[in-house]
Amino acid sequence: MSLVGGAGKLSGARKDLLLQWDRVRRTWRDANAEHFEKAYLHEWEQQVNAAHRAMTSLAATLKQLRRDCE
């Protein structure tokens, strides 16, 4: 799988998880849900976004390297 493909899969998985969390959050409204969201999901989402940016950037760099080597 290419980096672009992996970044796409990561983005899709992120979207799916956040949609599912939204469904859960409609019924789970206590302090534990809020703690889980703040302690885990926000941090996780930042890490996923950073990984996605890095994968996209690296894919562009590799594409340019291939062009330069031709």
Image: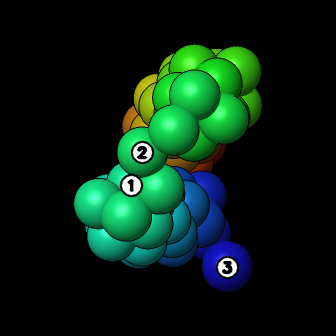
Q: In the shown orientation, is residue 27 left or right of residue 36?
A: left
Label 1 to label 2, Cα distance in Å?
Answer: 6 Å
Residue 12 visible here: no
Dot 2 falls on a residue whose secondary structure is loop
Question: Disc 1 vs disc 2: Cβ atoms closer than 8 Å?
Answer: yes
Q: Going 57% across and 20% down the picture, which residue do you hit?
A: 38
Could one spot residue 10 in this view of the protein?
A: yes
Where is mark 3, residue-wise? 1
Query: Which residue shows up at 51% across the image and 38% down it?
Result: 30
Q: Position of residue 13 (x, y in %)?
A: 51, 69
Label 1 SS = helix
Q: Amino acid at mark 1?
A: Arg
Residue drawn at the location 67% of the way across and 79% of the way down: 1
Amino acid type, label 2: Arg
Along the line of sight, which residue is nearer the eye, 39 or 4? 39
Residue furthest to the bottom? 1
Residue 46, given in percent of the width and then of the height, sits at: 54, 22
Q: Which residue is mark 2?
A: 29
Give above or below for 5 relative to 15.
below
For badge 3, the amino acid type reads Met
Q: Which residue is mark 1?
A: 25
